[in-house]
């Protein structure tokens, strides 16, 4: 069996958004607002994609932050916005991610990052998290001007490697990303981080693990 090229989502899958909780606690008085903001962030990105009105992912995140503040009745200064949004560049990896990526590289897999953020942002994120050395390519849906889970975003990865979509396996901790990859014709592996579940209306991927090391071990066993 030929190994899939492994395509990794970045935010939440590799990098830990909980690192933003202290600033959300300080600004909003409640660290759980971070999850509300990220949920609005993803919803707004999906609306942009469905309605064929492209905006850079970072601009969507800023707008979602403003919407969240308005909903909560909290005034956000420009300094507050900058602190939160720039914090995305400094996110640490989940504790097991370095080990999981290393095991896949050592097993001979080709790895790429595929994110909705611009390439400039994701390169900075991976450099700061000291993960960039594991990736053969760092890719952005911005190239297609269609955000994941639109099929065009996954096509960006396939074209960059000169392969068909079926040669890719997306690794992600988002049900919507898994759905997009599977329905585009890719394989997928789900990282079931705490509180994140699969959509029962979508075909279940053949690999599911509680963290990246579990997922990596299953990929190695299945495809090595």
Image (cartoon, rainbow, N blue to C red):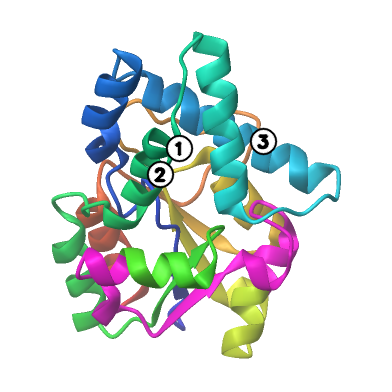
Q: Is residue 102 magenta?
A: no
* Disc 1 crowd, CA 10 A, few/some/many (<14, 14-19, 20+): few
Query: From the viewer's perspective, is the residue at label 3 or at label 1 nearer?
Result: 1
Mark nearer the N terminus (3 vs 2)? 3
Residue located beneath label 3 in the image:
44
Residue 166 image position (x, y, % from top left): 63, 72
Residue 190, position as x, y percentages in the image = 42, 47
Q: Are marks 3 and 2 in contact (CB under 8 Å)?
A: no
| Quadrant of res 10 | bottom left
Q: Residue at x 27, y 51 (%)?
A: 91
Say if mark 1 contacts mark 2, CB within 8 Å. yes
Q: Of callouts 3 and 1, which one flags the residue occurring earlier in the amino acid sequence?
A: 3
Residue under label 2, please give it: 82
Q: Is residue 132 magenta?
A: yes
Q: Is residue 126 visible?
A: yes
Magenta segment: 126-155
Q: Residue at x 40, y 31 (%)?
A: 196
Q: CA distance from mark 3 to mark 2?
A: 19 Å
Residue 188 image offset from top left, x and y in percent: 50, 57
State left or right for residue 91 relative to residue 163.
Answer: left
Would you place residue 24 above or below residue 121 in this image? above
Q: Identify the mark at residue 78; answer none if there is no mark.
A: 1
């Amino acid at each position: 069996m030929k190994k899939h090229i492994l395509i990794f989502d970045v935010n939440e899958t590799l990098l830990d958004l909980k690192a933003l909780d202290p600033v959300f606690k300080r600004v909003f008085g409640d660290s759980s607002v971070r999850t509300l903001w990220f949920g609005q962030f993803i919803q707004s990105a999906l609306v942009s994609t469905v309605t064929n009105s492209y905006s850079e992912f970072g601009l969507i995140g800023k707008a979602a932050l403003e919407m969240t503040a308005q909903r909560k009745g909290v005034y956000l200064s420009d300094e507050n916005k900058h602190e939160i949004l720039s914090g995305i560049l400094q996110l640490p990896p989940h504790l097991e991610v370095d080990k999981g990526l290393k095991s896949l590289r050592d097993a001979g897999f080709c790895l790429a990052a595929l994110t909705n953020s611009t390439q400039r942002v994701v390169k900075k994120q991976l450099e700061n998290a000291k993960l960039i050395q594991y990736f053969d390519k760092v890719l952005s849906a911005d190239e297609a001007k269609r955000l994941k889970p639109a099929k065009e975003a996954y096509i960006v990865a396939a074209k960059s490697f000169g392969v068909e979509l079926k040669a890719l396996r997306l690794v992600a901790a988002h049900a919507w990303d898994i759905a997009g990859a599977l329905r585009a014709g890719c394989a997928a592996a789900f990282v079931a981080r705490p509180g994140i579940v699969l959509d029962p209306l979508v075909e279940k991927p053949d690999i599911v693990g509680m963290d990246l090391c579990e997922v990596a071990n299953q990929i190695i066993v299945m495809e090595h």
